[in-house]
Amino acid sequence: MTLKSANAIVQTLKAQGMRVTPQRYAVYANLLSRQDHPTVEQILVDLNREFPVSSQATVYSSLQALRDVGLVREVLLEEGVCRYDANIDPHHHFCCRHCDKIIDIPWSAFPGLDLSQFSSHIYAESYEVTVQGLCESCNESDVPTRPSTI
Amino acid sequence: MTLKSANAIVQTLKAQGMRVTPQRYAVYANLLSRQDHPTVEQILVDLNREFPVSSQATVYSSLQALRDVGLVREVLLEEGVCRYDANIDPHHHFCCRHCDKIIDIPWSAFPGLDLSQFSSHIYAESYEVTVQGLCESCNESDVPTRPSTI
DNA sequence: CTTTGTGCAAACGATTTGCAGGATG
DNA sequence: CATCCTGCAAATCGTTTGCACAAAG
């Protein structure tokens, strides 16, 4: 975990009058150390792999606390599967249709979409692009492709 | 329901050797008659409002059948909430941060995003833009806005 | 008369809640 | 010592499954 990230959780939680507990720190550190977007179950197993660190209910409440202060966000791409992401900088996602692998797409790939056409009806604050298709390994594994709708 | 839509369910299900049952027809007709993106619960209540039409399990299985043949798709924008949409033409979604109202955005708003930059890593088949913000009524109701990240 | 679909109830899995005990400020 | 957090277990919610009966080809 980088210094910046360690500072982030301490300063951000304290600024809200919330405690920096070992469990919250561990959940946040785990998210930062991963490049995927784990589920609660994956975080729980990972944390308790060597010795007990946290209970299931505490992982849920830690994630809620981290989300409340804006350190973590949800990623919803599959039905019934809620994933978590410590990268709160705006970015997009690719999701493999075959293996459900999720890959971050940098914001610079689709920056500055023009939302002014909605200004009369809605107030647009942010957007996100989700790309679907086949990841590199599924594409190489002869998973049949579909015609692009793009 | 338009003629085209009525034909859609009959022809599409039959083409797959599946039966056009009253329950499947009712679920599809209900989806077509709405402009929102209802949950299973909302569809079930709506169908059985006047007299019993379908059970909960049958709504689930009907939706799965309709989804399997491509007449219906899921919309996943909130955690733990799975919504359904009979509009299968590619389009985007706006989701109100305050009241969770969902509004369709026509495909023409963001057509032809350039995905060629991923061609070496992944095979992109489709994409969808999700816009977050405040809907007209929440914006007028003095819900505090957030700085745009756009 | 064989196949497919419905409906009920039970099972299931993910998440939330209540509450007692522990840690922190 | 007052508050916040953890951990366990029970409750809850949405969804799926097993099975007997009904409907359709």
Image (cartoon, coloured by chain):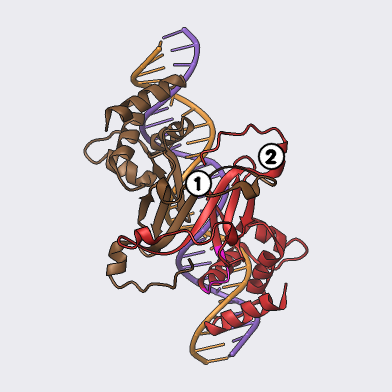
Chain colours: A red, B brown, C purple, D orange
Helix or strand or loop: what does disc 1 sit on?
Answer: loop
Amino acid carrying mark 2 in the image: Cys
Write down the chain letter for disc 2. A
> Which residue is disc 1 drawn over?
B112
Residue B54 in view of the camera: no
Measured as percent of width and height from the top left, residue B131 is found at: 44, 58
Which quarter of the figure is the N terminus of chain B placed in? top left
Q: Is residue B102 on the magenta stretch?
A: no
> Which residue is disc 2 drawn over?
A138
Measured as percent of width and height from the top left, residue A133 is found at: 60, 42
The residue carrying pointer 1 sits among few (fewer than 14), some (14 to 19) or many (20 or more) residues within 10 Å by Cα, namely few
Prevailing secondary structure of the magenta residues: loop
Task: Pick whichever, D7 or A144, lies toward us.
Answer: A144
Q: Residue at x 38, y 72 (%)?
A: B145
Measured as percent of width and height from the top left, residue A127 is found at: 47, 60
Measured as percent of width and height from the top left, residue A27 is found at: 65, 68
Write down the chain letter for disc 1. B
Residue A121 in view of the camera: yes
